[in-house]
Image (spheres, rainbow, N blue to C red):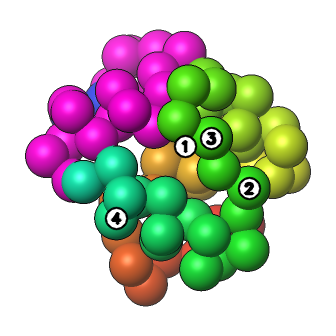
Amino acid sequence: AQFAGAGIGSKTLTDLAAQTGHGLTQIKSRLSKKGMKVGDDQPLKQLANQNNVQPLELLKAALVDAYVPR
């Protein structure tokens, strides 16, 4: 439960990359391939709102290749 209660909505993709060890380029590429808008310094909550998903769904989509957000 690496992100349990961690306020993921306030983290950015840059923070996510640093915290998980996934490359920022890889994370952005994953999201783009799923048709999602991306930005380095926007909070995940804001990015999630722009993409009409919950922050946790955005997080899963960013970290798991095969995951498709709902």
Badge 3 crowding class, 10 Å Cα cut-off, few under 14, some 14 to 19, many 20 or more, is few
Q: Amino acid at mark 1?
A: Leu
Report if the CB atoms under discs 3 and 1 are less than 8 Å apart: no
Q: Is residue 17 visible?
A: yes
In the visual, does 41 lie left or right of 2? Answer: right
Which residue is under mark 2?
37
Mark 3 vs 2: CB contact within 8 A: yes
Residue 45 place in picture, x, y as percent: 68, 28
Residue to which mark 3 is pinned: 39
Segment tinted magenta in the rendering: 4-22
* Among numbered discs 3 and 1, the one appearing first in the sequence: 3
Q: Is residue 31 magenta?
A: no
Q: The residue under label 4 is which amino acid type?
A: Gln
- Of marks 1 and 4, which one's residue comes earlier in the chain? 4
User: Marks 1/4: CA distance?
Assistant: 18 Å
Task: Kindly report the distance in space between the C-alpha atoms of the residues bearing marks 1 and 2.
Answer: 15 Å
Q: Secondary structure at mark 2?
A: loop
Is residue 49 placed above or below 29 in the rendered structure?
above
